[in-house]
Amino acid sequence: MFYSILANISVLTLAIYLYFRMNDYLDQKRAGPLKRNFFYFLWVVLVGTVLMKYSIVAFQIHFDFRFILIALACIYLDWSVVIASIFFLSLTRFIFGSNLMSVVNLFFYFYLMATLPIISKYSKKRLSIFNQMNVTMAFMVTSSIILHLMLGTLNPTIILDCLILLASGVVGNGLMSLYIEDLSEVYQASNFDPLTKLQNRRKLNQLLLSLENSGEECCIGILDIDYFKKFNDTYGHAVGDRVLRFVADYLRQIESSNARIFRFGGEEMVIVLFGKNLSESCENLVQLQKNLPAFCQQQVDFPYTVTLSQGIAHKQRNENLFKTLKRADQALYRAKEQGRNQTILND
């Protein structure tokens, strides 16, 4: 039994790692919600099927850690994915084990599909992720005990099995919570700037390569905070950091599925626009640069006036996007040379 529990935890550990890798892949492919949810659905079904294969036998009763997988899905995935995955897993078990118990399990999964959203909604408002997992798992195990009671099959052995299952789940949840926390930190550090929370240069390079391969039209703007060194020298680095965060938050108003923002380095940030209506989007980019000083003056809790210099370049026909980025940088240099607080287009 110990080795089966270890195998289940190993499967879940590998699955969590693959989840993070899958997210990175989907980011690179600029996958939309539908495509993401389809991949998540396949991930849950595949992992659930493997867990069924390595079921644990205790007192001649088979069980596995699918309930931990479902609890994870309830917390991290969209409900359309969770319900579809539970349904497919229950159907798979029914098809490959068509007996009375498989029919009962099928209706039990229908019950979970109806009740888990309510439990999850309640716990998310009140509990940490670790405790949300424990509550969700306890609910599923308790529901299983009630089901056996209703069928008249409840006995001390089944109760002991359920307690072992829940205890193993809580221990596994504790280990996986630490694992997920560590992986999340690595993922954040490799993809996001820790100060501004904008995507970093690595993610910029990924997007440019993706756009290069797709051949999409795009526009690149590089923005530089004017006289940023003055903020550090006059008010200290804490104020400099505050200015960087303020500008990053201000630029986020243009962010969308077709507009991505990155911290390029130092006080420079990059906005990449792609898709339809590029002319209108680029005009919004110009207005964004112009409107920052007025926006600063409207902020009661931000006593500094910040201006931006900006260089913009549209991708030319058959042009490598990294060359487009370089032309935007050249336009930014000219904007700073010509007095700052302006936008120069390099077309």
Image (tube, rainbow, N blue to C red):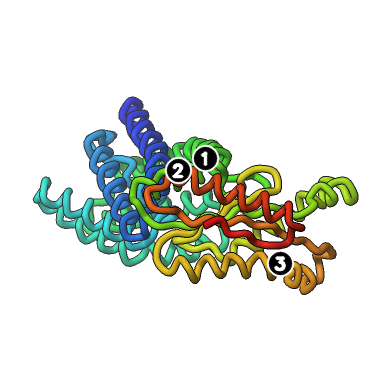
What residue does disc 1 label?
202
Q: Secondary structure at mark 2?
A: helix
Q: CA distance from mark 2 to mark 3?
A: 29 Å
- Image location (x, y in percent) of residue 35: 31, 56
- Image location (x, y in percent) of residue 298: 77, 74
What residue does disc 3 label?
292
Q: CA distance from mark 1 to mark 3?
A: 27 Å
Contact flag, marks 1 and 2 (Cβ < 8 Å): yes
Q: Is residue 46 left or right of residue 96?
A: right
**Would you identify the image quadrant in which residue 284 lies?**
bottom right
Q: Is residue 186 left or right of residue 293?
A: left
What residue does disc 2 label?
206
Q: Identify the mark nearer the N-term, 2 or 3.
A: 2
Q: Identify the mark nearer the N-term, 1 or 3.
A: 1
Residue closest to the far top: 3
Q: Amino acid at mark 3?
A: Leu
Q: CA distance from mark 1 to mark 2?
A: 6 Å
Q: Residue at x 34, y 46 (%)?
A: 213
